[in-house]
Amino acid sequence: MSNLYEPIIGLEVHVELNTNSKMFCSCSADYFGKTPNTHTCPVCLGLLGALPLINKKALESCIKVGLALGCKVSNTSRFERKNYFYPDLPKGYQISQYRWPLCVGGKMEVTDKNGNTNSIRINRVHQEEDTGKMSHIGSVTRIDFNRSGVPLVEIVTEPDFRDTDEIRDYAKKLQQIMRYLGVSNADMEKGDMRLEANISVRTSRSHRTRYDSVGGRSELPPYRVELKNINSFRFMVAAVEYEIKRQTEALEKGERLIQETRGWDENKKQTYVQRVKEEANDYRYFPDPDLPQFDIDNEWVSTLKKELPELPEEKTARFVAQYGISESNAKILTDTKELADYFEEAARVGVEHDIDVKKIANTLINKKFDQEKILPANLIKILKEETDKPVLSDEELEKAVRDSIKENPKVAEDYKKGKETVLQFLVGQVMAKTKGLADPKKATKKLIDFLQGNR
């Protein structure tokens, strides 16, 4: 990209909550893979006379997300109707939040392409309901309303991103936090977590004129392009990089960019126009008359705050300080809450058996095994057996090698004549004589040395 321009990027991330029921009705929210249109009722289908009821568990999950991101929880909140027409929206409006979000403010630290740490401001964390899902088969479009009404949390950032490394880091950290909190599986392949980016390009700071900077003229361009519903980190990075390049080339040609919504075509590796981008007032937000304003008292928030688990960054720092392991190893061990808990339990049991905690950490990082089948206590038992295993001296290994050759003269002669495959037989003999204590690689080298007359 030309250094004359720099990208300005903000993210909107939608996360489906793993509540038992939907946001405003009692239908099951476990819709993935189920028969289409079997998890529906008059409320989530938007039938006349059906009245919504707020799912308190979903509200609690949304507040926990806000707290984990350092947001301020609002004292009062309410739901509004976001009005637009689309076939997968049965009511003709989506119940969402605009003027009264549950949480505001907050931030997250991310790393850019140069390894620098930057702060991304969180504008808001609010609650809304999901829409139905359309699938296109040839000229036929089918709609499944099982997803309609499933609770969503939307996390909206300020336009603070400057490169795709920051975007990737933010999205992965956000996914990790959702899983640590236990509020969502955040599985992008299943649509549990969907990314949207708002992208524009402006004159870089080093190339702005004095006039450009007056009144913040260059701070935010007069347009933004929204990339909708990206369902993988790789696609998001590719789509954003393409869009930055497209916009930069357009500006260099003197073209005027407009506000629009675009999608990502993975096959063509390019974005495409979906529609002209709407402003908030195009949605005619107004308070939902069926859902009154509600208060959020400090006691409730304090209770939810106490329920928050130790989050990944805090846990990583503690592992480094408490166990003396490297930061890179600590990040690997805290990648999932399950792995972190396994390590801590193994470390606790390991202390009782004088097993070095760094050995436990290295085993978990470098050796793949089924954690569900091998309990932490069993892992320590295996490591202790390895630690207590007798050490074979070089003299003992050499004796076993000499004896194996002496007892099998024909095999030794075959090897000397070029039949190298017989070497494995002699290695087996050495392993048997040492009762499995010999290192097979060392045994092989010793055998070759003796057979070739190097000893």
Image (cartoon, rainbow, N blue to C red):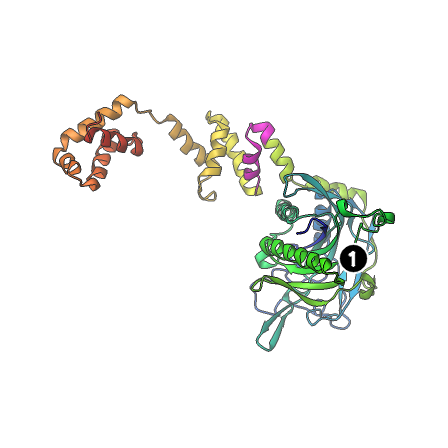
x 74%, y 62%: residue = 255
Q: Viewer-proximal residue, 145 or 317?
A: 317
Q: Which residues are magenta?
A: 320-335
Residue 416, percent from left and from top: 16, 36
User: Dividing the picture into quarters, in which one does residue 201 lie?
Assistant: bottom right
Residue indicated by mark 1? 97
Q: Viewer-proximal residue, 30 or 8?
A: 8
Instruction: Tell me if I can see residue 206 in this picture.
Output: yes
Per the picture, the main secondary structure of the magenta-coloured stretch is helix
x 86%, y 49%: residue = 211
Instruction: Find out whether residue 325 is within the magenta segment.
Output: yes
**The C terminus is located in which quarter?**
top left
Residue 98, percent from left and from top: 80, 57
Instruction: Find out whether residue 164 is within the magenta segment.
Output: no
x 46%, y 27%: residue = 355
Residue 309, percent from left and from top: 65, 40
Q: Is residue 330 left or right of residue 118?
A: left
User: Dividing the picture into quarters, in which one does residue 434 lie?
Assistant: top left
- Please tell me whether residue 297 is drawn above or below residue 264 in the rendered image: above
